[in-house]
Amino acid sequence: MEIVKLLLAKSPMLVRMLIQPNKENGSVETRLKVLTEITKFPRASPKAAVVYNIGV
Protein backbone atom coordinates (compact mmCIF):
# COMPACT_ATOMS: atom_id res chain seq x y z
CA MET A 1 0.00 0.00 0.00
CA GLU A 2 3.00 2.27 0.46
CA ILE A 3 3.62 2.26 -3.30
CA VAL A 4 0.07 3.52 -3.90
CA LYS A 5 0.61 6.28 -1.35
CA LEU A 6 3.93 7.26 -2.96
CA LEU A 7 2.54 7.28 -6.50
CA LEU A 8 -0.45 9.42 -5.52
CA ALA A 9 1.76 11.86 -3.63
CA LYS A 10 4.47 12.20 -6.30
CA SER A 11 2.60 12.00 -9.64
CA PRO A 12 1.25 15.42 -10.60
CA MET A 13 0.18 14.22 -14.07
CA LEU A 14 -1.71 11.15 -12.82
CA VAL A 15 -5.27 10.94 -14.12
CA ARG A 16 -6.39 7.47 -13.06
CA MET A 17 -5.03 4.66 -10.91
CA LEU A 18 -6.66 1.25 -11.24
CA ILE A 19 -6.26 -1.11 -8.30
CA GLN A 20 -7.32 -4.73 -8.69
CA PRO A 21 -6.92 -6.48 -5.31
CA ASN A 22 -6.50 -10.23 -5.04
CA LYS A 23 -9.97 -11.49 -4.09
CA GLU A 24 -8.56 -14.67 -2.57
CA ASN A 25 -6.48 -12.84 0.06
CA GLY A 26 -9.13 -11.07 2.09
CA SER A 27 -12.76 -10.51 2.79
CA VAL A 28 -14.90 -7.80 1.25
CA GLU A 29 -14.75 -5.99 4.59
CA THR A 30 -10.95 -5.98 4.49
CA ARG A 31 -10.94 -4.64 0.94
CA LEU A 32 -13.39 -1.89 1.95
CA LYS A 33 -11.08 -0.88 4.81
CA VAL A 34 -8.18 -0.65 2.36
CA LEU A 35 -10.28 1.46 0.00
CA THR A 36 -11.20 3.80 2.85
CA GLU A 37 -7.54 4.23 3.74
CA ILE A 38 -6.49 4.82 0.13
CA THR A 39 -9.08 7.57 -0.36
CA LYS A 40 -7.44 9.50 2.49
CA PHE A 41 -4.00 9.57 0.86
CA PRO A 42 -2.87 13.02 -0.37
CA ARG A 43 -2.63 13.43 -4.13
CA ALA A 44 -0.26 15.54 -6.20
CA SER A 45 -2.73 15.60 -9.08
CA PRO A 46 -6.12 17.23 -8.56
CA LYS A 47 -7.43 15.06 -11.41
CA ALA A 48 -6.24 11.74 -9.95
CA ALA A 49 -9.05 9.23 -9.63
CA VAL A 50 -8.56 5.93 -7.84
CA VAL A 51 -10.57 3.05 -9.28
CA TYR A 52 -10.60 0.21 -6.76
CA ASN A 53 -12.47 -2.96 -7.66
CA ILE A 54 -13.61 -4.52 -4.38
CA GLY A 55 -14.96 -7.54 -6.26
CA VAL A 56 -18.30 -8.03 -4.57
Image: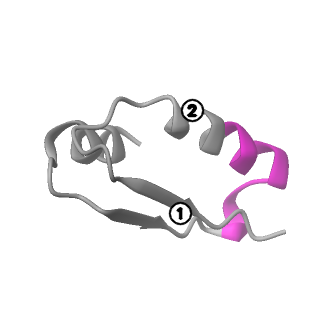
Q: Tell me, for residue 51, which label it has, or none.
A: 1
Q: Which element is circle 2 on?
A: helix
Q: Which element is circle 1 on?
A: strand
Q: Position of residue 12 (x, y in %)?
A: 15, 47
Quarter of the image where one finds residue 42: top left
Say few, some or many: other residues with alpha carbon within 10 Å of mark 2 (under 14 / 14 to 19 / 20 or more).
few
Q: Residue at x 54, y 70 (%)?
A: 20
Q: Is residue 28 above or below residue 33?
A: below
Q: Position of residue 16 (x, y in %)?
A: 37, 65
Q: Residue at x 64, y 36 (%)?
A: 36
Location of the N terminus by quadrant is top left
Q: Is residue 43 above or below residue 11?
A: above
Q: Nearer the viewer, residue 42 or 19?
A: 42
Q: Earlier in the sequence, mark 2 or mark 1?
A: 2
Q: Viewer-nearest of labels 2 and 1? A: 1
- Left or right: residue 56 versus residue 26 is right
- Stretch in magenta: 23-33
Amino acid type for the residue under numbered disc 1: Val
Location of the C terminus by quadrant is bottom right
25 is within the stretch colored magenta: yes
Q: Residue at x 41, y 31 (%)?
A: 41
Q: Which residue is mark 2?
A: 37
Amino acid type for the residue under numbered disc 2: Glu
Q: Position of residue 52 (x, y in %)?
A: 58, 61
Point out the residue furthest to the front here. 46
**Which is the main secondary structure of the residues drawn in magenta?**
helix
Say few, some or many: other residues with alpha carbon within 10 Å of mark 1 (under 14 / 14 to 19 / 20 or more).
few
